[in-house]
Amino acid sequence: MNSRKIESAIYFANGLALMASMLISFFFGGLGEAGLRTFIRLTAWQATLLFVAVSVGAPLESRAPNGWTRLLDSLSPVLLKATALSMLAHLSALVFLALAFPEPFRSTLTPLALAAGGLAYTLLMMFAFTPKHVAVHALGPLAWRRTQAVGFGFIWIIFVRTYFSRTAEDPTAIFFLVLLGFSAFFRGTWAFRTQPGSNSL
């Protein structure tokens, strides 16, 4: 299977997963607030798994180069776009929840949380949809590498903060915190050893 077919398969699978999340949310929560919250949770899980896959692709290929790790690393840009699309679905559901069922959702929001979340979404979209050659030409390889490191770190912090705040009410949050910790370790140790001109994401 060539790379283009694999990319198409990833987008197709991501779309199927989003559709499955909608059906599951409707089945267990209906069209009301419960269904929306279920969809928000499921899309967050999906985006987190994809983000972890993106984060560990290059480090795993560097530590244990083989066909599978090289494939994962080469697909990182596609997986990042899938992450962004999942987060767009997640954000759309959050906005709809705030409009349709404003309380207690709105009362839990703070200006800092809105600003931090908005910045994380913006960074994710920028990394996902800005061609690498354009970014490197505009900023230079070293500046782009540093921008990625800071941006990925900030997005990671937002993910961790969100799951950490839900550990008491949602036991699955611990699982995702462990995954995020694993990805941070691998990404961090790899980043310190990688040359600015690396082709990896």
Image: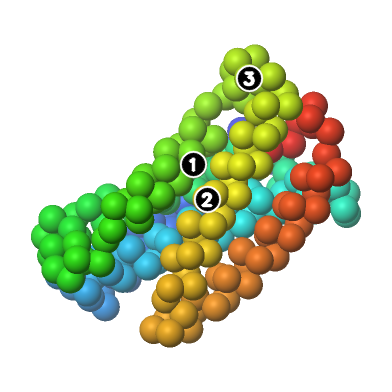
- Dividing the picture into quarters, in which one does residue 139 lie? top right
Name the residue: 54% across, 57% down: 157
Q: Quick check: 3 above or below 67?
A: above
Disc 1: CA contacts within 10 A as few (<14), some (14-19) or many (>=20): many
Residue type for callout 1: Leu
Name the residue: 72% across, 24% down: 141
Disc 2: CA contacts within 10 A as few (<14), some (14-19) or many (>=20): many
State yes or no: discs 2 and 1 in contact (Cβ < 8 Å): yes
Q: Is residue 7 visible?
A: no
Residue that carries the numbered disc 2 in the rendered image: 155
Q: Is residue 123 visible?
A: yes
C-alpha separation, residue under disc 1 versus residue under disc 3: 18 Å
Quarter of the image containing the N terminus?
Answer: top right
Q: Nearer the viewer, residue 132 or 108?
A: 108
Q: Nearer the viewer, residue 170 or 61?
A: 170
- Judge left or right: residue 112 versus residue 79: left
Residue 139: mark in rendering: 3
Name the residue: 53% across, 27% down: 130
Residue 124: mark in rendering: 1
Residue type for callout 2: Ile
